[in-house]
Image (cartoon, rainbow, N blue to C red):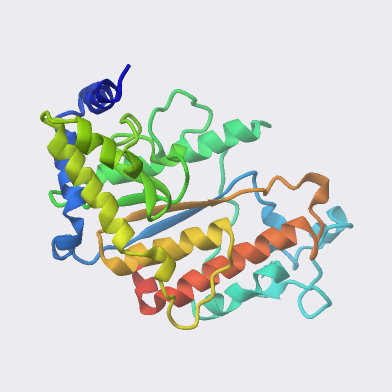
Amino acid sequence: MDRRYFLKQGGIGLASFGLMAAAPNFLHQFANAAIRRDVYGKKKVLVTIFQRGAVDGLNMVVPHGDGEYYNLRRTIAIQKPNQTDGAVNLDGFFGLHPSLKPLEKFWQSKQLAVVHSAGSPNNTRSHFDAQDYMESATPGVKATRDGWLNRVLQGKSGKEESPFRAVSMTGQLPRSLYGRAPSIAMTNLADFAIKAGVYTKSVQGGFEGIWQENVKDSLSETGAETFQAVNFLKEANPAQYKPENGAVYPNSQLGRSLRQIAQLIKAGVGLEVAFAEANGWDTHNNQGGARGQLANLLRDFGQSIAAFATDLGKQMDDVV
């Protein structure tokens, strides 16, 4: 198999599942996103953060007003507010883990809300199944092909949809974005994969030279448009991005992801759904209480979100 055959076959793969007709238009929109920002207008943005491994919600948002919490968690309970390593009081009954102190000001300004007792009704003991059900939003049903975020996008389709409409700051498309609505998976803005739903082949910027050298048929225009889109994001130069309002992002997976999501929001490219994830929440007996593994994870979580909200400033009015 030579390079020309490989690239042609890779391009023809776009025809699978009936996507050939839609793919060139999608890529054409993507390539021209930089000059069509005015078309997309002001967008509301939903940012979803998946805490993979299942965070301990009772030590993240502490029911310090419930005596049973302390009876049942004698070794890992978070102390009451105003005590050493105590919870950050919210309403006299609930409080935040002390590592989430950076989020307190957003609660006080009514920008932060906590939805309690919300989760899956399925009682599986498998973390993998539980995560799958959360991302498909069909508890107990493994056959669901699309994810809940993709169904949201499908239900809000319009004539002028930005190719940056849904972006996941991950190496692979998350289960929640599987489906017909186009979305993008990337780990950074300079090196990313384009996915039209879950079904298409990935297109990597490193193939540009080979493509131009070998492909001379009807796919070449689509390929050129794709690489124009790659170059547009490279020109955004994320390494030179300067957060505003004194925001300082942690140098962590989540911190880097939210920093780049903020950059896309400010760029006005029509972003509507953004996905980020943080790993390591399955802490088992290494969890600790106010200090330890969970505390370290929550510190990064709180600092990353606080930096994101601070960086966006008034633009947070359009972000959930």
Instruction: Name the residue rendered at 83%, 58% in the picture.
Output: 76
**Which quadrant would the N terminus be assigned to in this image?**
top left
Please give left or right for residue 4 compared with residue 97 in the image: left
When the figure is inspected, residue 79 is found, relative to residue 292, above or below; the finding is: below
Residue furthest to the bottom = 245
Residue 164 visible in rendering? no
Instruction: Name the residue rendered at 46%, 33% in the picture.
Output: 138
As rendered, which of 36 and 134 lies closer to the eye? 36
Residue 308 visible in rendering? yes
**How far across and down, in percent of the image, does residue 66 sit?**
76, 63
Instruction: Name the residue rendered at 80%, 64% in the picture.
Output: 291
Please give left or right for residue 4 compared with residue 107 in the image: left
Quarter of the figure with residue 311: bottom left
When the figure is inspected, residue 281 is found, relative to residue 147, above or below; the finding is: below
When the figure is inspected, residue 271 is found, relative to residue 250, above or below; the finding is: above
Please give left or right for residue 48 compared with residue 120 in the image: left
Instruction: Name the residue rendered at 83%, 47% in the picture.
Output: 285
Quarter of the figure with residue 254: bottom right
**How far across and down, in percent of the image, does residue 140 sit?**
53, 28
**How far across and down, in percent of the image, does residue 9 sit?**
26, 22
